[in-house]
Amino acid sequence: MKRFIYLLAAAAALIAGGCTHNDGDIGPLFGSWLVEDMTLDGERVAAGEEHGYVQFQGAVVMCKLIDDRHSLLFYSVGSYEREGDALLLNFTHSDNTTAPGELQYSAPQWLLLTPNAVNRMEILALDNKKMKLKHITPDGYIVEYSFRKTH
């Protein structure tokens, strides 16, 4: 019986020790973030009935708009790179049937990002639960975002 308990404890340690995120741990960015608030030049942007999410895994970023019935209204896929306090969101990708920055590779307009471009965002605050970002559009508008981590 004692031998069985040791074997069970060893198996549990091996399983728990092998747990990680796909493509490794990327730090506090990993996971799904809900857009809680968004301002344009200091004025709050009305969110409507949709819920915006930004999700990070590996080098991939996915942006989604979901309604109250959990129906997917819009999604886009890009890549990202973190350089210190800067977050670079790249929405210039393509595939065999989709032009660069089009359809599922387009920058999400609801986040006021520039289409078919690499969008630079400044990380104002980031921990495992909250994130604040700032983006300056090509026209000089300042957009600030507040996110809450959902998982």
Image: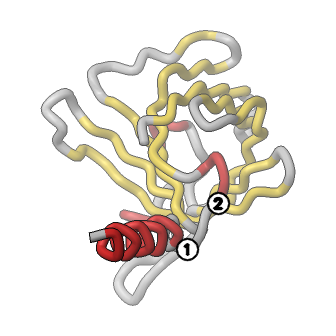
- Quarter of the figure with the N terminus: bottom left
Residue at 17% across, 42% down? 71
Residue most extreme to the top: 43
The amino acid type found where label 1 is placed reads: Asp
Measured from the top left, where is residue 19 in percent x and y?
48, 67
Horizontal side of residue 53 vs 124, given as left or right: left
- Expressed as whole percent of the image width and height from the top left, the position of residue 13 reads 47, 68
Point 45% across, 45% down: residue: 32
**Could you tell me residue 96's position as x and y percent?**
39, 89
Residue that extends furthest to the bottom in the rendered view of this protein:
96
Q: Position of residue 98 (x, y in %)?
A: 39, 78
**Quarter of the image holding residue 91?**
bottom right
**Residue 26 shows which numbered tag?**
2
| Residue ID at (43%, 83%) | 95
Q: Quadrant of the C terminus?
A: top left
Placement of 99 over or under 46, stated as above or below: below
Number of residues whose C-alpha sits closer than 10 Å to that of mark 2, classed few (under 14), some (14–19) or many (20 or more): some
Q: How many marks?
A: 2
21 shown above or below 68: below
**Residue 96 or 17: which is nearer the viewer?**
17
Q: Considering depth in this image, is 130 or 10 the residue closer to the camera?
A: 10
Amino acid, disc 2: Ile
Numbered disc 1: secondary structure: loop
Which colour style is shown?
A: secondary structure
**Residue 41's image quarter?**
top right
- Above or below residue 132? Residue 24 is below
What mark, if any, has residue 23 been given in the picture? 1
Q: Which element is circle 2 on?
A: loop
Q: Are marks 2 and 1 in contact (CB under 8 Å)?
A: yes
| Residue sitting at x 41%, y 67% | 9
